[in-house]
Amino acid sequence: MGKQNGQMDLNALRIFFVLYQERNMRLAAERLFSSQPAMSQHLSKLRTYFDDELFVKVPTGLEPTSFADNLYQSSYELFTQLENSIATSQAFDPSNIEHTVVLAVSPLLAPIIGHQFFKRIHELAPKLKILIHQWSKQTLDQLKSDQVQLGINYQIVSEDKQIREKRVLQDNFRCLVRKDHPHISTIITMEQAAQYPFTTIIASDWNSQLSYAEQVFAAKGFDVEVLYRSEFPASILDVVQNSDTIFPCSQLYRFTNPEVFRSIEFEGNPDVLKPSICFYHHYKNDKDPLTQWLIEVLTEVLDTP
């Protein structure tokens, strides 16, 4: 490192860390809301500063040098701690936030937070931009690499000690059916529900192999026939609207038209149909004011009838 002239600012280090995590100039530029030419200029300055190539081109993108590997492993945690310390030492005012926040949300819960969340965020932080991704098998890794600020899902099984789980509330599943569904009553037993075909939403890390409804009904000795699975709530509603299928869903769903759909409660509100809704974030954000503020706003939205 014989060419270190001047001081290295935090923004330059952030660019290095993102390049290291993405191993791709285009993806790093998109993540930082920059351009590839600008990223190339930053990388050139980093190379000059550290007197090392840092990254070499390979068919798949960029490959870090051994120096870059050592730099990342030895400094990334310190860097994030420093950023959090700076953020904590300053008075947190959401109205001053101008960057983009990335969330990962289960497709089962995405319809719940919708416009209510946007409205509340826009009231408190009018300059803040929200980017919502669907929860995927990569989400936990993305939380650890700062690609995602906060994840929202039903409680998942994870032994990753770097990920924090915070249970927010307990949901209560109900049946969503078309208005003219043959089950006329507003109450249904699990045995009665099992007589109708089901539609279910596919949610990674929660029910990608076997739907929650199938697991719960099987545990009670009932077999259910799932005729339609999808990652997209809109397609589920289209099927429900035009068939006698049952869609087991959150009691928090507020987007359904009573002229088209109606809900049926499960008799006795069985505890097995009450999954927990949780927030997930990297442990380094335990005291991060932005993360904690997002949790507060989302909790407020979920708790609002």
Image (spheres, rainbow, N blue to C red):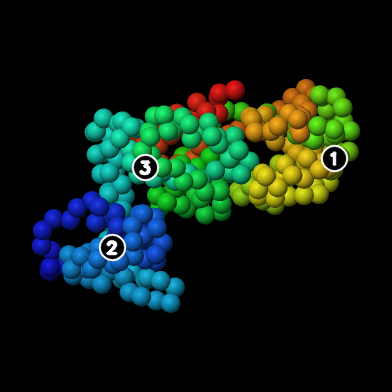
Foreground tag (2 vs 3): 2
- Which corner quadrant holds the N terminus? bottom left
Pointer 2 with pointer 1, Cβ within 8 A = no
Q: Quadrant of residue 155?
A: top right
> For the residue marked with disc 1, what is the amino acid?
Asp
Is residue 50 among the parts visible in the rendering?
no
Whole-percent x and y of residue 17? 32, 57
> For the residue marked with disc 2, what is the amino acid?
Ala
Q: Residue at x 30, y 31 (%)?
A: 92
Which residue lies under the disc numbered 3? 284
Residue 38 badge: 2
Whole-percent x and y of residue 11? 25, 52
Is residue 243 among the parts visible in the rendering?
yes
> For the residue marked with disc 3, what is the amino acid?
Lys
Decide: is 30 above or below 65.
Answer: above
Decide: is 7 above or below 298.
Answer: below
* Crowding at mark 2 (Cα within 10 Å: few <14, some 14-19, many 20+): few
Residue 244 badge: 1
* Crowding at mark 1 (Cα within 10 Å: few <14, some 14-19, many 20+): some
> What is the distance, in whole Å, between disc 2 and disc 1 at their CAs?
55 Å
- Which corner quadrant holds the C terminus? top right
Q: Earlier in the sequence, mark 2 or mark 1?
A: 2
